[in-house]
Image (cartoon, rainbow, N blue to C red):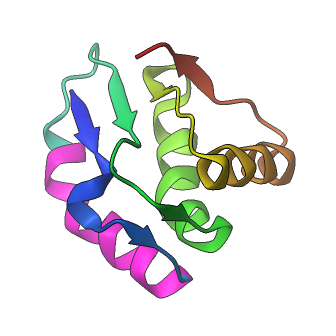
Amino acid sequence: MKVKLEKFGTTLISRELGSEAFKAFQPKLVALPPDEELEIDFSGVLTLSPSWADEFLSPLLERLGERLALLSSDNLSVQATLKILQEANKRQFKFSPR
């Protein structure tokens, strides 16, 4: 399954909004078959803050592990945030080419 983060907005900031987005995503996460990968697409996102991403992506990484794949992005905000999260979680994200 592919999820375009743009559906949550183009400026993804604040811990509260990230938490709300994760809660809104729960029904799709529960319906994800156990053998299916979840791809996160950052296209259309202008700004991704570490706090928003921590509330949304960190729980996904915890639950899905290798089944979570992040599509590569040229956006410097996305790249910097993902680097911060990997260091904070002491876990690497799996990246997939577009």
Quarter of the figure with the C terminus: top left
- Segment colored magenta: 15-29
- Report the predominant secondary structure element of the magenta stretch: helix
Residue shown at the point (26%, 44%) measured from the top left: 4
Where's residue 81, x and y in %? Answer: 69, 54
Residue shown at the point (27%, 21%) measured from the top left: 34
Left or right: where 78 falls relative to 88:
left
Left or right: where 47 falls relative to 44:
right
The foreground one among 66 and 73 is: 73
Residue shown at the point (20%, 58%) measured from the top left: 7
Asked if 61 appears above or below 35 in the picture, the reply is below
Give the total of numbered labels: 0
Quarter of the figure with the N terminus: top left
Residue shown at the point (60%, 49%) measured from the top left: 78
Question: Which quarter of the figure has residue 43?
Answer: top left
Left or right: where 33 falls relative to 88:
left
Where's residue 32, x and y in %? Answer: 19, 32
Where's residue 79, x and y in %? Answer: 67, 43
The foreground one among 10 and 18 is: 10
Q: Is 39 included in the stretch rendered in magenta? A: no
Question: Which quarter of the figure has residue 66?
Answer: top right
Where's residue 54, x and y in %? Answer: 61, 63
The foreground one among 51 and 62 is: 51
Left or right: where 46 falls relative to 79:
left
Question: Which quarter of the figure has residue 62?
Answer: top right
Asked if 22 appears above or below 40 in the picture, the reply is below
